[in-house]
Amino acid sequence: MSKTRFAAGILAALMAFTALAVVLAGSVSAKPKAAKATFQAALVSDVGRFNDKSFNQSQLAGLNKAKRVLKIKVLPIQSNNTSDYVPNLTTAVRKGSNIVLAAGFLLAPSLKDIAQQFPKTHFTITDDFVSSSTGDFKGADVHNIEGLTYATQENSYLIGCMAAMVAKSKFGSSTIGVVGGLKIPPVDTFLAGYRAGAKKCVPSSVVKIGYSQSFTAQDLCKNVAEDEIAGGAKVIFGVAGLCGLGALGAAKDHGLFGIGVDQDQSFLGTYILTSAVKRVDVGVFNAISQAKKGKFKGGSNLVFNLKNNGVALGKISPRLTGKLRKTVLAKVATLKKQIIKGKIKPPTNV
């Protein structure tokens, strides 16, 4: 073998070895590509929109938690008018969503139709009881619809008690008020519990009830609250989503207490006595999680209450102090235990 051929052979071997080393090094150091999420959940808001600092925003938080924790794709779709419900639900399905969550009671008629058109897609609805024999879904095939329901009469009962006791002790009046949005069952459930709780703890209570007929127009809720305050109300409970902020603002303007709804609205200021927290974020997350695991239960309803922390009280205002604070919170704690044990069953109808 000539020196030239020998040298060429050595060079070829070295080049082959180097190439192999590069390949092996690459196979060890290269990071595996993350698997792309294939499960998608869509949330269609109601007309309160996602910036309501309440009902819709809380559900959006549940959707975003599902994205982060469950590693799924999400599709939030905002409804600005009731006429958006059908096209938004349809868009959610056509964009490949495995589960579509309707954010509230008002979407029921639209959801009933869309769910029948797309029987292989899973749907949920917040604040409506799903049954083929009664209610909004009577006569429908509900195998692919699941209800997410909340016993808000329970925490509102506790809050009514608190409001009446505080009004009487701090302002020398047993008159309190509540401003609802539309007169629909999910709103009246709050109002019924609130009034019953007030009467339980202060029998002489007068509970003024009004409706703004809106979940968005803050000025309308403020007007209703102003009327209730003019009539002697010393605590105002806003049960109207974004609109409810107007009612709470009226309470603040008059140096009174306000009560938040859905989310813990203590961030608004110390004038918020507490909030009727409705864990719709938990409901949305749990529904998505079960669906992803293949445990979706169409034709049934998930119920969230005081016992499973699906409804709760928000932070208590630091303006409630001393002996009154201790007395009020002790009474509320006792009533809570009685509700959980079934000894007290707050009403759901106004």
Image (cartoon, grey):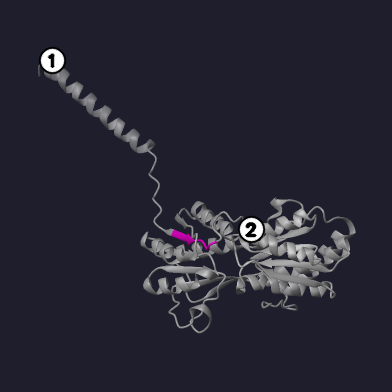
**What residue is at 84 percent from the left and 69 percent from the top?**
174
**What residue is at 52 percent from the left and 65 percent from the top?**
287
Q: Amino acid at mark 1?
A: Lys
Regarding residue 262, the answer to whether it shows in the image is no
Q: Which structural element holds mark 2?
A: helix
**Residue 345 coordinates in the image, percent (x, y):** 72, 78
Q: Nearer the viewer, residue 1 or 282?
A: 282
Tag 1 residue: 3
Q: Is residue 24 left or right of residue 304?
A: left
Residue placed farthest to the top in the image? 3
Q: Amino acid at mark 2?
A: Gln
The answer to which of marks 2 and 1 sits earlier in the sequence is 1
**Residue 52 coordinates in the image, percent (x, y):** 59, 56
Choose top left, top right, bottom left or bottom right for residue 56.
Answer: bottom right
Q: Which region shows up in magenta? A: 41-47
Q: Is residue 285 left or right of residue 313?
A: left
Choose top left, top right, bottom left or bottom right for residue 176.
Answer: bottom right
> From the image, which quarter does the C terminus lie in?
bottom right
**Residue 163 coordinates in the image, percent (x, y):** 79, 65
**What residue is at 67 percent from the left and 78 percent from the top?**
349
> From the image, which quarter does the N terminus lie in?
top left
CB atoms of marks 2 and 1 within 8 Å: no
Q: Which structural element holds mark 1?
A: helix
Alpha carbon of mark 2 to alpha carbon of mark 1: how far? 94 Å
Residue 167 located within the stretch drawn in magenta: no
Choose top left, top right, bottom left or bottom right for residue 164.
Answer: bottom right
Position of residue 76 relative to residue 157, above or below, is above
Position of residue 192 relative to residue 75, above or below, is below
Tag 2 residue: 218
**Residue 32 coordinates in the image, percent (x, y):** 38, 43
